[in-house]
Amino acid sequence: MTDLKLALLQCTSQPGDVLGNLQRLDHAAADAAAAGAHLLVTPEMFLTGYNIGATQAKVLAEATDGPRAQAVAAIARQHQIAIVFGHPEHDAADHIFNTAQCVDAQGHTLGTYRKTHLFGALDRSMFAPGAGDEPLFELHGWKLGLLICYDVEFPENTRRLALQGADLVVVPTANMADFDFVAQHLVPTRAYENQLFVAYANFCGREGDLAYGGLSCVAAPDGAGLVQAGRDTELLLADVTQAGLAAGRALNGHLAQCRMGE
């Protein structure tokens, strides 16, 4: 395991503009790689926009190895950086999911995750819920798990990943300004109670009738906020370290004393 530098892209959403979003991703990946980052995290449904409606979600849905994912893989290879990105995905039965996917610096898919807890009428009109049974994956010796937005507000989700051995939970989100509590208080709590790092990447600005809150952040296993963005576009950088992980796990014994499954 080596220390990781994370880059979180906080930006406005450009709904329906897949080519434009891929260009933005290319620029962000170049900037993140130049800053020494190993992993770039984008907001929920970054490649297509989130507030796109059921018809567009179905039209834009692709498989996890489709042209969109291949384009992201090419960007990852070009800049030698791993990327977490979100998009609508369909399975063989044509169910549509809100999916986050991670590719490594060689463009290989390391892990995918389908959002399990759908928030509000918009989410439920576009997507089927995922099963929440995706395994952890490794990046530079770190064990990573993925959640999406509302998922992190249910403690069972992060705890499930922690009990599997996660060191870092990555959360692409499209959270509105009315729910600042999540970034400011709940994300650090999830990190503390599960003795791991949590990275939370949000949109900012407006997308149709939605006003996003920004405040992307990274929280440490001791509950400390390592970094937090403001309300505007920003490439947020944070170091997650082996020493920080060990110190957080020495601070309390939540996982060792957890009685789930007894």
Image: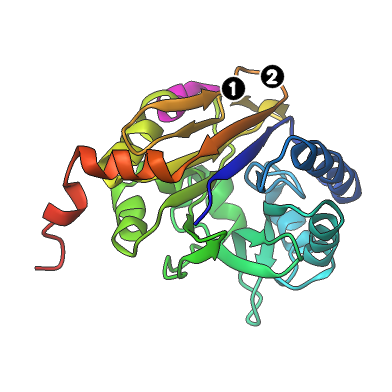
Q: Looking at the picture, does residue 37 appear above or below residue 72? A: above
| The quadrant where residue 222 appears | top left
The quadrant of the rendering that contains the C terminus is bottom left
Disc 2 crowd rating (10 Å Cα; few below 14, some 14-19, many 20+) is some
Display colour scheme:
rainbow
* Stretch of the chain drawn in magenta: 177-183
Residue 116 vs residue 261, the one in the foreground: 261
* Residue ID for mark 2: 232
Residue 201 x %, y %: 59, 37
Q: Secondary structure at mark 1?
A: loop
Determine the CA span between mark 1 and mark 2. Answer: 8 Å
Q: Main secondary structure of the magenta part?
A: helix
- Asked if marks 1 and 2 touch (Cβ < 8 Å), the reply is yes
Q: Secondary structure at mark 2?
A: loop
Three-letter code for the amino acid on which mark 1 is drawn: Ala
Name the residue rendered at 87%, 56% in the picture: 78
Name the residue rendered at 45%, 58% in the picture: 116
Residue 101 vs residue 81, the one in the foreground: 81
Disc 1 crowd rating (10 Å Cα; few below 14, some 14-19, many 20+) is many
| The stretch drawn in magenta includes residue 128 | no
Residue 156 x %, y %: 29, 53
Residue 4 x %, y %: 56, 46
* Residue ID for mark 1: 229
Residue 106 vs residue 159, the one in the foreground: 106
| The quadrant where residue 223 appears | top left
Three-letter code for the amino acid on which mark 2 is drawn: Asp
Q: Is residue 27 left or right of residue 48?
A: right
| The quadrant where residue 184 appears | top left
Q: Is residue 12 left or right of residue 261?
A: right
Name the residue rendered at 37%, 27% in the picture: 224
